Image: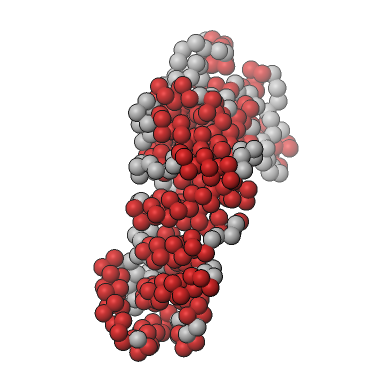
Amino acid sequence: MARSSSVQIWSLFEPDDSSSPYGTADNGLLGQLLGHLIVCWTSKVWEIQQEALLALHHLCRFIQQQKGTMSPQPDNHRDDPEHSQGEGKREAGKPSWLSLCSTRGMAKTFGKYLRPADKTFIILRAIEAMRDSCVCDKEELISIVNVAEAEPASWLTEVSVITRCIHNNLHDISTASARHSLNLLLLSMAKQDPREMILSLTDISPACDRVTQDMWEVLLSQLPILVVVLRELNSNLQHLQLCWPLRFHRLKACIQLLILLVSSDVTPEEFAQIYSMEKCLRLRNGVLFSLTLQALVTLSQSPKRARKILVLLPELIDRLRRVHSKNRMKMLLVFRNLMGHVKIASSTALQLAEKLPQLFDDESSEVRELSICLFKEIIQMANCMHKRQMQKNVQESLVPLVLHMSDETESVAKASQEALYVAAKVLKWKWLSHHPQAHEIWRTAECLLEHDRSRAEKYARQSMAYLQHAQGWPRGT
């Protein structure tokens, strides 16, 4: 009977033609068992953790006996007097080296004896257990994913299955470190098998739901992966047409525009000429527009590509106020990247100086902070031809900057204080540069009014608009 049981358990290592819930070609029963046990080991309930540890210990001993090898040392084995004295001196039933293992060490140790299909199921169980509702140690689960990322050739062989699992669970995972880990896993799989990754994402959600969009944005966030993704998309246009028939022509135009930005064979002048005919960015504020912006954020980090993107600035500036907050942030990041690599025309700087103050009251503190920081840089760029108009724009922004020195977000308050100091220098108002301190807000406001009482009504309207947005109430009130 014992031998029969051993044969049955050991048969879990052998290939199986039945399918799994995630569509693998292998049911991976051993992988599912190990996945569940390792996840239970990460439980915050002590009793569950200890039961799982004991089961893992016995399962490991069984595997070693079947393989006819000695019990392996865990990768993070610490000095253990019992271990050096041999197995015979242990208490009966007491876990041996597994009690000295981290979850990462367990995954690596068991992984030496598992087929890729079994490893896939361990990853799936770890991802599922990252959901907010699971009482598991998320950092320990992340360590399992880290093992897979470090050894993609043997752990990430079923890209479509893992991608679908991430999609099914990502909405219910809010822990920042867990989401970051899954982002890195997506990037690792895109390196491992970019074609399978692209086809999987398009098949999973033809409508490109919120979760799928987040996953696409991860793939578009790193330049080397972005380049590979664009090439794969361009090579699989027929598949894209089947999945996204209604938006295919706009999608194709955007892909080809971005490929031109990537290509080193296309000069900025040639790109500008092509873009003037295509105007690919004139899209509705939907998923495709948002993903295109994410690609531009990544591409604008490259000096060579930043010079090409300059031609897109007028259209981006024109749409700055008419997009939702997340896309505004992407546009601001493009502006910041461009300003770090290329010289912005004075006329374009003037356009930005007119638009950016409209974002000072944005619902997103990140948008507020970055728009104020960019405004501080922009107002110093105008040449003699536009200097007077720039000073007028600066004067219009003074009250919003003063009020945001009391913004509820400390970084926004600090950015406002620094911008106000620069504004005083641009206007050559020495008296104003002496007052931009958070605790002197009302004194600064009084000085503005004393300097030009004809603007009292304008200042009052700006103050009311600030209060209505309720973004940053004065501290201590």
- Residue drawn at x 59%, y 46% is 268
- Residue drawn at x 36%, y 51% is 323
- Residue drawn at x 40%, y 62% is 355
The x and y percentages for residue 202 are 43, 28
Is 267 in front, or is 198? 267
- Residue drawn at x 39%, y 54% is 318
Which residue of the protein is positioned furthest toward the right in this rendering? Answer: 84
Residue 94 seen in the figure: no
Taking 468 as reference, is 135 left or right? right
The x and y percentages for residue 302 are 61, 49
Residue 67 in which image quadrant: top right
Above or below, comparing residue 237 to residue 473 in the picture: above
The x and y percentages for residue 265 are 64, 38
Is 271 in front, or is 239? 271
Above or below, comparing residue 397 to residue 247 in the picture: below
Taking 73 as reference, is 288 left or right? left
Above or below, comparing residue 328 to residue 106 in the picture: below
Residue 436 seen in the figure: yes
